[in-house]
Image: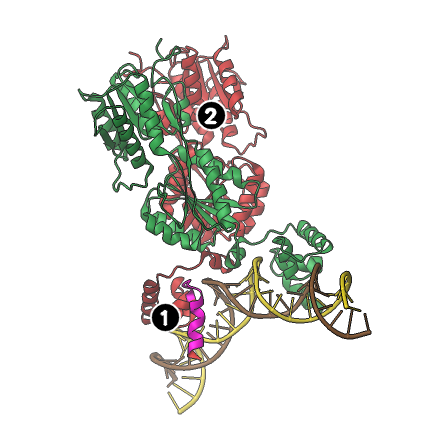
Chain colours: A green, B red, C yellow, D brown
Amino acid sequence: MSIEEKQKPQRNDRVTIRTVATHAGVSVAAVSKVMRNAYGVSDALRARVTDAIEALAYRPSRAARGLRGRSFTIGVLLIDIRNPFLPEVIAGVNGVLAPSHYQAMIGVSDARVQLETSLIESMIDYKMDGLILVAPRLPSEILAKFAVQIPIVAVGYHDASATAFDTVNADDQRGAEIAVEALLACGYRDIEMLSLGERQGHAVSVVRQREIGFRRAMQRGGLGSSPAIGKIPIASPKREEAMRKFLSRKDRPRAVFCWSDLDAITLLSLAMEMGVRVPEDLAVIGYDNSSTAALGLVNLASIDQSGRELGQIATRALISRIEGRTASEHIFQIPSLVSRNSLKRSGNSTDR
Amino acid sequence: MSIEEKQKPQRNDRVTIRTVATHAGVSVAAVSKVMRNAYGVSDALRARVTDAIEALAYRPSRAARGLRGRSFTIGVLLIDIRNPFLPEVIAGVNGVLAPSHYQAMIGVSDARVQLETSLIESMIDYKMDGLILVAPRLPSEILAKFAVQIPIVAVGYHDASATAFDTVNADDQRGAEIAVEALLACGYRDIEMLSLGERQGHAVSVVRQREIGFRRAMQRGGLGSSPAIGKIPIASPKREEAMRKFLSRKDRPRAVFCWSDLDAITLLSLAMEMGVRVPEDLAVIGYDNSSTAALGLVNLASIDQSGRELGQIATRALISRIEGRTASEHIFQIPSLVSRNSLKRSGNSTDR
DNA sequence: GGCAAGTTGTAGAACGTTCTCCATATAACG
DNA sequence: CGTTATATGGAGAACGTTCTACAACTTGCC
């Protein structure tokens, strides 16, 4: 009889909670208790179990855990892996998660609503413990519906009225204002914004927020009630085309604020090709303070919103929500200006 | 009695396979069969079940699936999310996966062996169906051990003798040769390589492979039996320091081949700052053909290894392995040169 | 009409956890 | 010494799937 009992567990080589229990000479429930450090475990038992876990190199199955309780995994949804702002956020998330027993799994939606939905659903179906959505495309009502099923923190999503989920943002309106103020301080009056030509202009999107901030700062500076905002397409052939058109305009402004470094850097590049000098003919300021902007070769002034910090804050918020908080939080960070040559000639210029 | 039966399923609002079965008036097993389109299902049954699935918007729990069988998820492990080569690979993976019922979940290891191990283990514990490891740091024996538990394809990992897992690579030796040949064709004889200063120099790593190719091409060109290879640290203050030191050397070569665009672009930038003209004083060629290299502002010649294609190939290989292939495959792509101004002055130069 | 072979559907045992009871042992108290 | 509280450990039912048997029902064929 005891032979039969011994043979069965050996058929499969996976070390399960049962293997550990047998090895330690205790019940399965006891091992589970130790794992979750639940109430009602003596030091002696704990020691024996941890020894067995050590000896067998036991790892709990995340699949099984997900089926019953916590999976200790949080999902991160990225809209697009190419934007250099996103890796920063990930770094922040991983930094906070590293010392904890949580792990991050990342999904990339390529900005497609369809895929975004199905990835969120998958993460729910995995019984992940919570979700960090970075610049999601989905409308607030849909997110609220998901938030009933799983704790959600949205980053780069402006909806301070949401009650079902948290938001963590840099103050994009303020960021745009800072950009305009910097240009004004350099003496420029002739300023335009180059924004993103999105299909649906969610008011929640960071881009729209930056447009609002731009308009307000321009009005406050006494520069007309409806300052010019150009739209640049996302996809590649039309994108460069639109920028060239802007650069060759006769009434081109003296200064431009780009919604993202991505566009600002390409603009800088095309300007050079077309013989438009920066900053003499055109001052440029970007957004995100990406590592490329910091290159001496590029030297692009930019608004820094510290993606890393946003990631950290979002992660902490998510964990607190997972651990029981229900009231929603809406956190704002104040971005800052990083001044470089594209804004105004400094002593150490490119072409001295 | 029927009241009791009806109440129980309603306690929880999740739609499970049981809900679907009840709604369609069939057994749970029947629904499962339809889901997996297994053998032994009549058209009538299938229709009824799919109708019920539609009506209830049923989504199978991935957690439960993972516990028993397939999870229809593949894990992708990235060493570092910042290197612009990686997003390309992801794009390739997602492209192939999109029309299938598989989904990708990404983990980021930050090049730390510890974290890499625990992420792989997590993915196994989730019962993911297979793993794509991009430039993993772990030694081959360890990967082989993991490969027993889960199908693995390694990208950017040179071990053609591995029998337990597949590898997909651009031919990095050949890529380096192409770079050297291009420099030779431009008339340069005085060529060095700037490589990565890694702690442990795995022979499997792409960087070491590029070094091998560099040496071979140099010897073949009759340029000494042990050409100079400098090592650049990864971390930021020392990295720039090493590059500045290289640039200010009296015996600085006329041409340099960098292991990655990441370094080549920074080098270009520092060269400009220090008044070293490219390509007049120094020709530079990078590796990866990143989007930044293509910018007119940067104009860096580079070896293109098409990360997207590698991602596609790896994904197809993984799926075929998941579906039963056991013999290992080792696939090579031939990289190509993208010539730009940093290599040799062309008609349309920066400073004409 | 009887038997083999094929088709279609179901019952029910896994899978590896968590977690609610419940049993037992020990301590505290009158 | 009996009664009640308080620790400690265990049994066993979930969780939502998959998948192996097997039952029931058709056919086909002699």
Residue A325 x, y percent position in the rendering: 49, 49
Mark nearer the viewer, 1 or 2:
1
| Start-end of magenta stretch | B3-17
The answer to which of A57 and A11 lies nearer the viewer is A57
Under circle 1, the secondary element is helix
The answer to which of A177 and A196 lies nearer the viewer is A177
Residue in the picture at 52% in, 17% down: B241
* Residue A251 included in the magenta stretch of the image: no
Q: Chain of mark 1?
A: B
Q: Are marks 1 and 2 on the same chain?
A: yes
- Number of the label disc, if any, that sits on residue B259: 2
The Cα–Cα distance between marks 1 and 2, rounded to whole angstroms, is: 60 Å
Under circle 2, the secondary element is loop
Is residue D13 toward the left or the right of residue B184 in the image? right
Q: Which residue is mark 1?
A: B23
The answer to which of B113 and B17 lies nearer the viewer is B17
Crowding near pointer 1: few (<14 within 10 Å), some, many (20+)? Answer: some
* Residue B6 included in the magenta stretch of the image: yes
Is residue B346 toward the left or the right of residue B8 in the image? left
Residue C2 x, y percent position in the rendering: 43, 88
